């Protein structure tokens, strides 16, 4: 679908002049292309937006007509994407508020949410929506694995500590950062899908989405991410190291003077911030 649409767009956008004023035919073609964008998935909308933006940067200096089309398609794709994201965000407020009312009172540590975890929120939120993944969980995993540092860890496994990847270490660029986030979603969904295929009973499956997740879904996800393979595990699962999920959630799970809020309490703190902002 992605390649088909780009071929369609290219066939409609043929430029022979640098000085460009849109014609009636051009606006009709643009409207037709926009109508196609209203039928695609949120993931494809985000993909098209990025492609239009990249192509626009490449042609802006030498082809005004093509730049006109790409600019309008870029803005329209982003607008459609944002409308759907904001609608999902609004519809999830009652569920998230109820979840917080149930679990937030049990957090034993009351330090504020680290500001560096929110610094890239819009990017992480857009990517989470495009991948139908809870933004609060994306940020919680990033914090757990690299304390939300905007850098490449020394071991080369990236901010989400995916050991099958090698990103190098040191300075990180925005494009590399975005790639590491996308790699996280691909890695996480691959584990989840393999686990769900192995555990076909509905009560055992992991059901995450942009609008939220149950406590059990979060716990099972933590178990998979904390070392278990979705292809080999069956039945109820828990993190290999309970601290990975619980640390900072209740007094009984706090060890020593460790002040970090691990996966579940960080998930709650980010969700709390989301509902206030």
Image: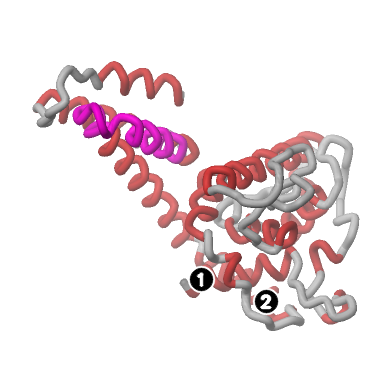
Where does the magenta region start and end? 45-69
- How far across and how far down the image is residue 56, in percent? 33, 34
Q: Residues within 10 Å of mark 2 (few under 14, many from 20)?
A: some
The residue at the point 86 percent across, 56 percent down is 239
60 inside magenta stretch: yes
- How far across and how far down the image is residue 101, in percent? 63, 76
50 inside magenta stretch: yes
Magenta stretch: dominant secondary structure: helix
Q: CA distance from mark 1 to mark 2?
A: 13 Å
Pick whichever, 221 or 160, lies toward us.
Answer: 160
**In this view, 174 is above or below 14:** below
**In this view, 147 is above or below 39:** below
The residue at the point 71 percent across, 37 percent down is 190
- How far across and how far down the image is residue 184, in percent? 67, 45
The residue at the point 33 percent across, 47 percent down is 79
Res 34 seen here: no
Q: Identify the element where label 2 is drawn.
A: helix
Task: Residue 76: name its quadrant.
Answer: top left
The residue at the point 89 percent across, 79 percent down is 256
* Rendered image: mark on residue 194: none
- Residue where numbered disc 1 is placed: 275
- Residue where numbered disc 2 is placed: 104
- How far across and how far down the image is residue 58, in percent? 35, 31
In the image: residue 116, left or right of residue 199? left
């Amino acid at each position: 679908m992605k390649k088909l649409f780009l071929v369609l767009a290219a066939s409609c956008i043929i430029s022979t002049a640098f000085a460009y004023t849109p014609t009636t035919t051009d606006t009709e073609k643009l409207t037709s292309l926009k109508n196609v964008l209203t039928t695609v998935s949120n993931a494809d909308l985000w993909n098209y937006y990025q492609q239009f933006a990249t192509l626009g940067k490449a042609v802006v200096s030498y082809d005004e007509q093509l730049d006109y089309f790409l600019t309008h398609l870029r803005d329209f794709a982003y607008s459609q994407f944002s409308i759907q994201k904001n609608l999902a965000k609004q519809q999830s407020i009652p569920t998230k508020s109820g979840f917080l009312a149930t679990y937030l009172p049990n957090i034993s540590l009351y330090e504020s949410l680290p500001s560096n975890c929110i610094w890239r929120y819009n990017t992480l939120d857009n990517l989470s929506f495009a991948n139908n993944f809870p933004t609060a969980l994306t940020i919680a995993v990033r914090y757990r694995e690299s304390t939300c540092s905007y850098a490449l860890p020394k071991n080369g496994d990236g901010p989400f500590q995916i050991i099958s990847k090698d990103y190098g270490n040191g300075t990180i660029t925005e494009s590399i950062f975005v790639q590491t986030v996308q790699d996280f979603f691909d890695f996480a969904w691959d584990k989840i899908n393999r686990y769900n295929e192995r555990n076909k009973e509905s009560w055992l499956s992991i059901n995450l989405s942009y609008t939220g997740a149950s406590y059990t879904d979060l716990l099972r996800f933590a178990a998979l991410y904390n070392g278990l393979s979705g292809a080999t595990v069956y039945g109820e699962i828990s993190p290999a190291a309970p601290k990975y999920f619980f640390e900072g959630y209740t007094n009984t799970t706090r060890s020593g003077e460790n002040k970090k809020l691990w996966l579940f309490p960080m998930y709650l703190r980010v969700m709390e911030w989301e509902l206030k902002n």
